[in-house]
Image (cartoon, helix red, strand yellow):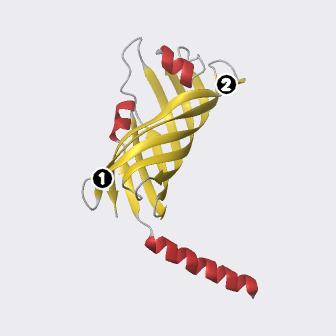
Amino acid sequence: MKKLLVSLMAVFAIANISVAQEAAIKWNPLYLGLGSVNLGIEFSVAPKWTLAFEGNAVIFNPWQNGDNSIYANGWTGTFEARWYTCEAFNGHHLGLYGTVGRFGEASSNFDLFNKIALGGHGATGATNVKAAMLGLSYGYYLKLNHGWGLDFYVGGGILYAMYNTPGSTEVQKSNIKPSLSRLGVVLSYKF
């Protein structure tokens, strides 16, 4: 009986908290330039704190032009906790985020992309890529009106990846590397 009573109290407490939450649906058009679509949602959980989730799917590759090409297909998901200096969805914010991703294959002839993302194997490609990132972000949320806003942010942290090189079944592991891994000019609608 005690377990039932505690469970009911927890359900009512959670229901009361979720009614008071504000939420925003977010879209980062910068990802279109990378051949990716994305959508995110951010919830306020306290007056200055929010939790966010963003998902990205790489659906096509606009960067194929002969020797200088980048190709990838896959997905990423990012979870972030943010602290706003004024109030949630207003002003400067600091965040802690984690990103996971999986790509069927990835290749690039750009040296910087090869060294950071593909462990130097980009010219020949990498398959079955699994990656994880952990980092800090800084940004500014600009209210345009009651519902609409723009969220500008940049984030960096550490990147770790596992992948196969073509013709090999041996799993390669990258070193843990510092990386600039988030950049956003995000259109947001708060409801």
Residue type pointed to by label 2? Asn
- Label 1 sits on a secondary structure element that is strand
Q: Which quadrant holds the C terminus?
A: bottom left
State the mark number for residue 13. none
In front here: 177 or 111?
Answer: 177
- Point out the residue furthest to the front here: 85
Residue at left offset 44%, top offset 22%: 70
Label 1 sits on residue:
149
Disc nearer the start of the sequence (2/1): 1
- Label 2 sits on a secondary structure element that is loop
In front here: 189 or 34?
Answer: 189
Label 2 sits on residue:
175
Residue type pointed to by label 1? Gly
Q: Is residue 101 among what the camera can see? A: yes
Total marks in image: 2
Which is more foreground, mark 2 or mark 1? 1
Q: Residues within 10 Å of mark 2 (few under 14, many from 20)?
A: few
Figure check: 126 above or below 149: above
Relative image position of residue 81 (x, y in whole percent): 53, 52
Q: Residues within 10 Å of mark 1 (few under 14, many from 20)?
A: many
